[in-house]
Image (tube, rainbow, N blue to C red):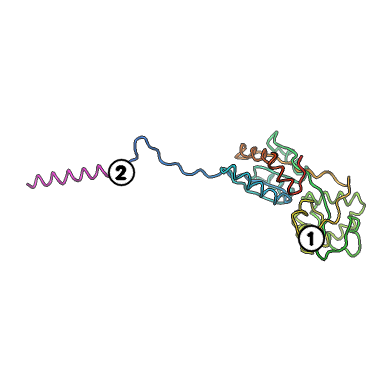
Amino acid sequence: MKKFLVLCVSALMLLMAGCGGEQASAPASGKAPAKDAQPVELHVAAAASLTDVMKELADTYEKDHPGVKLVFNFGSSGALQQAIENGGETDLFYSAAQKQMNALQDSGNLVEGTRKDLLENEVVLVVPKEGGKDIKSFEDLIRSDIQHVALGEPKGVPVGQYTEEILKKLGILDQVKAKAVYGSDVRQVLSWTETGDADCGVVYATDAAVSDKVKVAAKAPAGSHKPVIYPAAVIKGTKHPDEAKDFLAFTSSDAAKKIFEKYGFTCK
């Protein structure tokens, strides 16, 4: 009887062990479920004047490309150029001037064959919409009652470089520099003008268009500065060349052109 009980218990234990092992092992033909793939992050360095339009473009692009996440670094083109040269993670660069893109091309930082001129803009003089001084031209900047003129810092901010060309052409550069306050990018110039911290500022037409706190006092005289061209390119060393080239192509598409034009840009 004891032997019979021992045999029964042993058989029961073997049966339970067999069932447990069967539950723990995966089916012979099955595979472990794959984890959801993380989206590719594209790091895009873009001129500050592109802030609003790039955000809308990103929303449109990401809806059709759920496997891509766009991460932007907005700032002056000069500062962005330096960051790229110093090894900052960047897949694409959208500059507000040829100068910074030329420097990157000369230093071998662009993927060959990807550079293209994308957009054109205008330079305008803006004043606060309410309570501003009666300024109607760039020549008015030398008036004694105009004390603070907001300009882009000319070494690294393209709008500041264009502004110096304009003022030099008009023969008033030195007089205006004496009352200039320099912003780190075009959006800072716009902000100072909006708040009245500056009597006026020189920005792009597209920056003036997105603000309801300033109005355009004057456009830059024809022929007073180089054309404001926005080049774009893929940066050498990108970890995602195919995705970067695809987004660059998208920003040249008809769908993107409509969005750029909505914000006041002229497409090339």
Residue for point 27% across, 45% down? 20
Residue for point 69% across, 36% down? 114
Residue for point 64% across, 42% down? 91
Q: Is residue 151 magenta?
A: no
**Prevalent SS, magenta region:** helix
Q: Is residue 6 magenta?
A: yes
Residue hosting label 1: 193
Front residue of 173/28: it is 28
Looking at the picture, does residue 168 appear above or below residue 267?
below
**Most distant residue in the right direction:** 171
Confirm whether residue 38 shows in the render. Answer: yes
**Residue 25 sits in which quadrant?**
top left
Front residue of 196/209: it is 209
Residue hosting label 2: 23
Residue for point 67% across, 38% down? 249
Front residue of 136/113: it is 136
**Most distant residue in the left direction:** 1
**Residue 138 sits in which quadrant?**
bottom right
Judged from the image, the secondary structure of the residue bearing numbered disc 2 is: helix
Looking at the picture, does residue 228 appear above or below residue 203?
above
Q: Is residue 2 left or right of residue 29?
A: left
Residue 46: x and y in percent read 70, 47
The segment highlighted magenta reads 1-22
Mark 1 residue type: Thr
- Quadrant location, the C terminus: top right
Front residue of 3/178: it is 3
N-terminal label among 2 and 1: 2
Looking at the picture, does residue 28 appear above or below residue 211?
above
Confirm whether residue 109 shows in the render. Answer: no
Mark 2 residue type: Gln
